[in-house]
Image: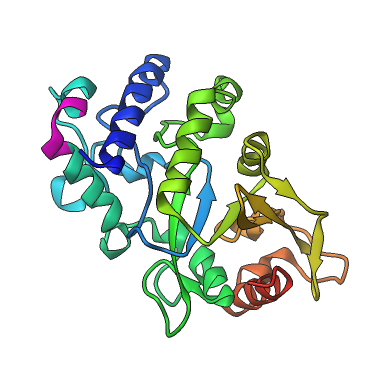
Amino acid sequence: MDQATFLLQRAVRMQATYMESGELVERSTPVLWYGQTGAELVTVGVNPSKGEFLLRSGCVRPLEQRKFFTRDKEGSLQEFHDDEIMLRKSISYFQKYFANESISRPWFGQEGGAKLEGFLQGMGASFYRAMNESMRAIHVDYFPFATIRQMGKIPERETWFEDASVHELFKERVLYLKPKRLLSLGATVTEQLCALGAVLGEKQTVEGYPSAMYQTGTFFGIPMVVLHFRPSEQFVGLGSKVDSLGRHHGSYTKKEVLAEIGRLIGEGADW
């Protein structure tokens, strides 16, 4: 077995423990990354949404709409762990995520659109393709297991996040992917990266968009940018307010504005 398969097996063993909480999506499997390996930029989020495995009705996605490998009703995590064919199918889902019509466009954004993809295009990157000389991006969640409730509503989240095995699995996934740059999305993830040894500079603001704050630093020698706003969320996670220049945060979500902010941060980080 290759390293990716070993990493997935390790994650499956961890998931078996976390399933006892009742907070994880039944029949789900670990999501180690989203997108084709070999990408230059890794974006880092908190954990997979339940929508990666479930329809809005709460039912498991039918086969033709699945984003990731989903276990059969009778299939146990142990069976998944021991079956190399299923493990490789799961990894193929990771690789093909952004070529799948069922991807989470409301969060990642569609090709050529706004949201996180729009921001990345301003930085000269894309989840969907390498544009001219731009970077190809891939996504990783710090906690690789889909939960029924949002992570912020789960009492055990702090214990989970401080788990040394979760820390180690995240670090090994990043080192396996070998990115040239990291983009951390929000304070929750950044706190864990700092616990793992990330080194950050002072907070900076984007000229013309004072609420768009960021930091630069390194994670195991990899240049990193930390965002203190969230391009994929309503009002970019800053609330329905205006910034110190009187610009409403809602305007920050426009495609052209996100691209401009991404460009300015990329220049400020010397990317």
User: Is residue 49 rendered magenta in the image?
Assistant: no
The image shows residue 166, relative to residue 111, as above or below, that is above
Between 177 and 146, which is closer to the camera in this rendering? 177
Task: Give the left or right position of residue 193, taking residue 102 as reference.
Answer: right
Q: Main secondary structure of the magenta part?
A: helix
List x then y, in percent, for residue 266.
65, 72
One can see residue 111 in this view:
yes
Between 50 and 4, which is closer to the camera in this rendering? 4
Task: Give the left or right position of residue 202, taking residue 189 as reference.
Answer: right
Q: Quadrant of the C terminus?
A: bottom right
Count of numbered circles in the view: 0
Q: Quadrant of residue 152?
A: top right
Q: Residue furthest top?
A: 20
Bounds of the magenta span?
81-86
Q: Quadrant of residue 263?
A: bottom right
List x then y, in percent, for residue 142.
50, 40
The image shows residue 2, relative to residue 75, as above or below, that is below
Task: Give the left or right position of residue 55, taking residue 191 as reference.
Answer: left
List x then y, in percent, for residue 242.
80, 64
Q: Quadrant of the N terminus?
A: top left
Task: Give the left or right position of residue 103, taking residue 184 as reference.
Answer: left
The image shows residue 163, relative to residue 266, as above or below, that is above
One can see residue 66 in this view:
no
Q: Quadrant of residue 6?
A: top left
List x then y, in percent, for residue 8.
30, 35
**Residue in the image at 39% along x and 35% along y:** 146
